[in-house]
Amino acid sequence: MVNERQYPMTLAGKKKLEDELEHLITVKRKEVVERIKIARSFGDLSENSEYDSAKEEQGFVEGRISTIESMLRNAVIIEETEGESDIVTLGKTVKFIELPDGEEEEYTIVGSAEADPFDGKISNDSPIAKALLGRKVDDVVKLTTPGGDMEVRIISISTAK
């Protein structure tokens, strides 16, 4: 048996994926099947853009269902460890200040399955997270970002909200 990739995630991240899976199976899948049925009633399928569109969406929905099922099957729940709050680990929220100008940023380091940079959640596989993991408050860390390298000083580490 091939070893499948593990997906570290918080309990909240797992719940979010379970909710998405439930919605895809119980709502979205039925909507797409109905769209296909309606498109078929238009006749000739060879030049039926509604049918093509619905079949394409069906492929996306089924692919996403399969991906989520695999993620949930291989989920590794990130335990919240209060005793290690002074070290940056998976599941921790890290606040840092850019040096020298002092712009403050905050990210929660999560597994790739629940990463959402717009919500302040970055993947443990990202260059920023890799540079921060294992560090402590007051450590100065060099981060490589798409905009170039920068130095930051960690000002707080807390358990993810």
Image (spheres, helix red, strand yellow):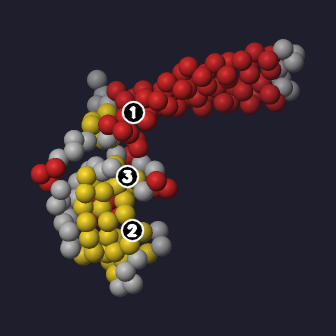
In this figure, which residue is indicated by the disc labeled 1?
15
Q: Residue at x 27, y 37 (%)?
A: 77
Mark 2: give few (<14), some (14-19) or many (20+) Cα within 10 Å.
Answer: some
**What amino acid does circle 1 point to?**
Lys
Report x, y in % for residue 91: 28, 49
Mark 3: give few (<14), some (14-19) or many (20+) Cα within 10 Å.
Answer: many
Quadrant of the image containing the N terminus: top left
In this figure, which residue is indicated by the disc labeled 3?
123
**Image side of residue 90 versus residue 20, left or right:** left
Q: Earlier in the sequence, mark 2 or mark 1?
A: 1
CA distance for labels 2 and 1: 26 Å
Q: Which residue is drawn at 33% across and 50% down?
A: 161
Farthest residue in the bottom direction? Answer: 100
Report x, y in % for residue 154: 26, 70
SS state under label 1:
helix
**Image side of residue 108 versus residue 157, left or right:** right
CA distance for labels 1 and 3: 17 Å
**What amino acid does circle 2 point to?**
Glu
SS state under label 3:
strand
**What amino acid does circle 3 point to?**
Ser
- Confirm whether residue 149 shows in the render: no
